[in-house]
C-alpha cells in the first residue's frame, strides 16, 4: 500500500484534494486523504487493515496484570467500603495494602489501575504490575547476560509501579538488597508505588525486609488493612457476603 500511495503522491497535485478516490487494495473502498503541508496526501493505510485500538483489558495485560485480574473492577467488590474509600482518596500517592490471603488486595490494585487507564490518567507505557518473587527471579536472570542493571533501572523508574505480594519472596541478601534499591529510589523520587502484602509493616515486613526499607514505606505509603475474610473460600462455598473489614 505504501508503494501505491507513494506513486499517487508523485503524480497528484497535493494543493487540491483529488476527486478520484484512492481505493484500498484490500477492500476496494476509498482510503481517504490526510492534510499534508497545506495540501492533501492519500492515506497510506485503510481502516480495514488498521488494528483497532487496544481495549482496557489489553492495556492491563500490557502493564503485566495477570489474566484473572484484568476482568476485575472496583465496582465488583462487595462490602469493601472502608478500604475502597481510602484507596480511592489516596491512590494519587503510594499505597500499602495488607491483609490475609483472599481479602481483595490484588483485585483492588488491578481495579485501580483499570480506573487510571480508563480515565487516561496513566498509559500502558507508564505503569507496571509485577509479582515480587517473579520480578526478583526476572532480575536475577539478567546476571547471565549482564542486563540486570537495565532491568532494575526499568522497574525503579516507571511512573506507576505495582508490587504485588511483597514479603512472599524467599528471604535472601539479593532479595533484600534489590527491594531496598527499588523502594529507596522510588521514595527519593516521589514515584507512585502501590504495594500488596500479607504482612503488616511492623509485624512481618520489618523482620523480612529490614528497618530501613520499612521506615521508607511507612512514610511514603498510605497503609490500608483489607481485613481477614478470605473471599476465595467464601466464593467456593457460595457463602454469604458479610465481610470482616477493618481500616487501620
Ligand atoms: N470484597 C470482595 N467482594 C467480592 N469479591 C472479592 C472481594 N474481595 C476479594 N474478592 C475476590 O476474591 C478473590 C481473591 O481476591 P484477591 O486475589 O484480590 O485476594 P488477595 O488479598 O490479593 O489474596 P493473596 O494475599 O492471597 O494474594 C478474587 O477473585 C477477588 O475478586
Ligand atoms: Mg494477591
Ligand atoms: Zn480496505
Image (cartoon, grey):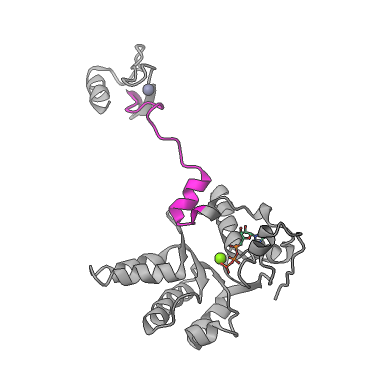
Q: Residue 103 appears in which quarter of the rendering?
A: bottom right
The quarter of the picture where the C terminus appears is bottom right
179 displayed left or right of 70: left
234 displayed left or right of 185: right
**16 or 179: nearer the eye?**
179
Rendering coords of residue 222 (x, y %): 62, 72
The quarter of the picture where the N terminus appears is top left
Q: Name the residue: 59% across, 53% down.
A: 72
Q: Quadrant of ligand 3?
A: top left
Rendering coords of residue 10 (x, y %): 22, 21
**45 or 168: nearer the eye?**
168
**Can you say whether 99 is above or below 232 in the image?**
below
Q: Is residue 156 visible?
A: no
Q: Name the residue: 39% across, 77% down.
A: 178
Which residue is at the far top? 20
**158 or 26: nearer the eye?**
26
Q: Is residue 207 visible?
A: yes
Specify start and end residues of the magenta stretch as a single range.
39-67
Q: Residue 79 appears in which quarter of the rendering?
A: bottom right
The total number of labels drawn is: 0
* The magenta stretch spans residue 41: yes
Q: Name the residue: 68% across, 72% down.
A: 228
244 displayed left or right of 201: right
**242 or 146: nearer the eye?**
242
Which residue is at the far front? 237
Rendering coords of residue 115 (x, y %): 59, 52
Amino acid at each position: 500500500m505504501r508503494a501505491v500511495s507513494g506513486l499517487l503522491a508523485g503524480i497528484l497535485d497535493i494543493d487540491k484534494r483529488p476527486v478520484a478516490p484512492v481505493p484500498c487494495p484490500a477492500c476496494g473502498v476509498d482510503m481517504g486523504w490526510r492534510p499534508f503541508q497545506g495540501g492533501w496526501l492519500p492515506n497510506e493505510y485503510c481502516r480495514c487493515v488498521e488494528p483497532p485500538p487496544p481495549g482496557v483489558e489489553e492495556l492491563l495485560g500490557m502493564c503485566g496484570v495477570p489474566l484473572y485480574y484484568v476482568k476485575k473492577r472496583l465496582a465488583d467488590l462487595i462490602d469493601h467500603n472502608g478500604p475502597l474509600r481510602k484507596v480511592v482518596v489516596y491512590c494519587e500517592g503510594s499505597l500499602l495494602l495488607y491483609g490475609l490471603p483472599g481479602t481483595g488486595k490484588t483485585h483492588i490494585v488491578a481495579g485501580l489501575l483499570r480506573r487510571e487507564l480508563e480515565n487516561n490518567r496513566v498509559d500502558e507505557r507508564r505503569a507496571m504490575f509485577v509479582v515480587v518473587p517473579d520480578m526478583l527471579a526476572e532480575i536475577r536472570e539478567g546476571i547471565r547476560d549482564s542486563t540486570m542493571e537495565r532491568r532494575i533501572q526499568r522497574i525503579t523508574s516507571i511512573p506507576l509501579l505495582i508490587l504485588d505480594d511483597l514479603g512472599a519472596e524467599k528471604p535472601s541478601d539479593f532479595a533484600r538488597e534489590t527491594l531496598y534499591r527499588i523502594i529507596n529510589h522510588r521514595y527519593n523520587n516521589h514515584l507512585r508505588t502501590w504495594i500488596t502484602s500479607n504482612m503488616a509493616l511492623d509485624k512481618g515486613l520489618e523482620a523480612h525486609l529490614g528497618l530501613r526499607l520499612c521506615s521508607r514505606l511507612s512514610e511514603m505509603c498510605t497503609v490500608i488493612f483489607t481485613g481477614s475474610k478470605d473471599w476465595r473460600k467464601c466464593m467456593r462455598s457460595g457463602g454469604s457476603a458479610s465481610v470482616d473489614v477493618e481500616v487501620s
